[in-house]
């Protein structure tokens, strides 16, 4: 296991992606949505008993991005807006047997309330500009998107661990689309844990 300082050193040496979130466009999101819709059911094979997993894409619904930005005092990256224009929510690689695996990306209507609920009691770990977009089933990890356009990490994705301080969190992508593409490629496996 790497210490927080060793992990930061490793991240500085090994860039996660060459694309910046500002260079991703609607075609990247369209490609992602096609891949998400094609997933269907898979089997998690890296366990002692294979587990059936299912993915579902919620249909697009109108939403008020400006209201979300005002409520959370953030600037949503364009790729998130384009994603929400194509899908309302995602349930990726969800364990259909026990509900102990998978990623839930909340709908725009859910994100403000869910974000506030999860930040409560952990204010010291979250920064202005963080938006919690979803949760991992079974272990309480959270998917965090950086939405402070003045910060160097604008648009990047973190995995917030349930009891560990921010210094121990994983940086898993330079953008949401990059993270989701890699997560789909890994068939729901937590690829970031294998990088240690």
Image (cartoon, grey):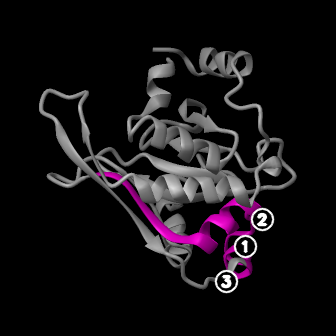
Q: Residues within 10 Å of mark 3 (few under 14, many from 20)?
A: few
Range of the magenta residues?
A: 66-94
Which residue is denoted by mark 1 in the rendering? 69
* Closer to viewer: mark 2 or mark 3: 3
Label 1: state its secondary structure. Answer: helix
Distance Cα–Cα, label 2 vs label 3: 13 Å
Earlier sequence position, callout 2 versus callout 3: 3
Q: Position of residue 174 (x, y in %)?
A: 70, 40
Instruction: Examine the rendered structure and indicate whether residue 96 appears above or below residue 62.
Output: above
Distance Cα–Cα, label 3 vs label 1: 9 Å
Which residue is denoted by mark 2 in the rendering? 75
Q: Residues within 10 Å of mark 2 (few under 14, many from 20)?
A: many
| Viewer-proximal residue among 145 and 50 | 50
Instruction: Examine the rendered structure and indicate whether residue 94 appears above or below residue 59.
Output: above
Q: Are marks 1 and 2 in contact (CB under 8 Å)?
A: yes
Q: Residues within 10 Å of mark 1 (few under 14, many from 20)?
A: some
- Relative placement, left or right, of 27 versus 167 is right
Earlier sequence position, callout 1 versus callout 2: 1
Which residue is denoted by mark 3 in the rendering? 64
Residue at x 78% of width, y 65% of height: 75
Residue at x 56% of width, y 74% of height: 108
């Amino acid at each position: 296991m790497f210490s927080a300082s060793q992990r930061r050193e490793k991240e500085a040496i090994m860039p996660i992606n060459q694309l910046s979130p500002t260079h991703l466009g609607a075609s990247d999101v369209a490609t992602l949505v096609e891949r998400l819709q094609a997933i269907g059911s898979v089997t998690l094979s890296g366990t002692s008993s294979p587990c059936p997993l299912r993915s579902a894409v919620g249909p697009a619904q109108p939403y008020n991005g400006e209201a979300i930005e005002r409520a959370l005092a953030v600037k949503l990256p364009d790729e998130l807006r384009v994603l929400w224009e194509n899908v309302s929510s995602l349930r990726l690689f969800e364990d259909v047997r026990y509900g102990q695996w998978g990623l839930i990306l909340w709908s725009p209507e859910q994100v403000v309330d869910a974000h506030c609920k999860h930040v409560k009691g952990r204010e010291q770990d979250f920064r202005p500009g963080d938006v919690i977009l979803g949760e991992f089933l079974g272990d309480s990890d959270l998917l965090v998107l950086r939405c402070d356009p003045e910060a160097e990490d604008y648009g990047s994705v973190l995995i917030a661990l349930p009891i560990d301080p921010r210094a121990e969190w994983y940086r898993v992508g330079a953008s949401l689309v990059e993270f989701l593409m890699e997560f789909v490629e890994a068939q729901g496996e937590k690829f970031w844990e294998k990088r240690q």
